[in-house]
Image (tube, rainbow, N blue to C red):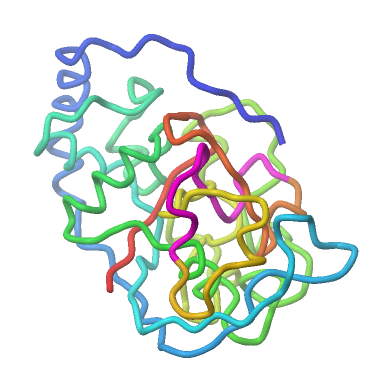
Amino acid sequence: MLVFLSVAVASPLSAQLESLRKGKSQALAVVSETPMAEIPDGLFAMGSDGTQALEDERPRHQVWLPVFFLDLHEVTTAQYAAFLDATGRPAPWLWETVNVSKHRDRPVIGVDWHDADAYCRWKGKRLPTEAEWEKAARGTDGRLYPWGNQLPNKERANFALGARFSYSQVLMPVQAYEAGRSPFGVYNMAGNVWEWVQDWYATSYYESAPERSPQGPELGQFKVLRGGSWSDLPKYLLTYGRFKLLPETRNSYTGFRCAKS
């Protein structure tokens, strides 16, 4: 998968706020609390074994998590617009191309890890841990994709659309793909946008991770992302697949959702 780091100079804050104000009335009219799925406590199998698994996806191991809640949907442009309006935080990369009234139900992109973390905290939530994300995506039966073991298709996920970005042409509404929901009813955990999670990345973390509530390495250079995007081939949509980026990265493939203990 090609990953493009943001090299564009951010728009002045005044221009960002003016762009936000143009769509403010439409955005605030449709912003609502994201429903959350309750993920029960218990064990699940994390990672994978065998020749198909990459080095950082091995070994398959048992993880126990307490009950937690995860947003059913990825954070949308309308929800993020309300966050910008309330906090004055600098706008994401490519925000000037957002038409909030038209793209209000599309996932926000162009956010780095710190943006995602700040939004979740503003909502009284947090980013999910990598283990939480994987359990919510694959359940307890070890499935390869959120919907089961069948290969992705256009009824289940938004993927393999190339590299040319447009909010209207490549991103799909966060409520789309009913047939692609996870065992807990969570939408778009494969495709649409990669999702930031809480953890730092380490290639060999699974070899020494604790069985109960793993939080990832204490420090690192990269943050973990999960789920694949609108641009990716099916192999990147696997429930156990891992990806990493510098936390300051902003691109057109990456968004997020929030969790709560």
Task: Judge left or right: residue 135 versus residue 27.
Answer: right
Task: Judge left or right: residue 230 versus residue 10.
Answer: right
Q: Is residue 89 above or below residue 151?
A: above
Give residue 254's position: percent from left, percent from top. 49, 40
Task: Choose between 187 and 68: the one closer to the eye.
Answer: 68
Q: Residue at x 35, y 84 (%)?
A: 67
Give residue 31's position: percent from left, percent from top. 20, 52
Task: Judge left or right: residue 117 versus residue 214.
Answer: left
Residue 231 in magenta stretch: yes
Q: Residue at x 87, y 69 (%)?
A: 50
Task: Judge left or right: residue 191 versus residue 199.
Answer: right
Q: Residue at x 54, y 47 (%)?
A: 194
Q: Residue at x 44, y 44 (%)?
A: 255
Q: Is residue 23 above or below residue 69?
A: above
Quadrant for residue 169, please give it: top right
Give residue 171's position: percent from left, percent from top. 51, 42
Q: Is residue 137 above or below residue 38?
A: above
Give the magenta range. 215-232
Quarter placement of the N terminus: top right
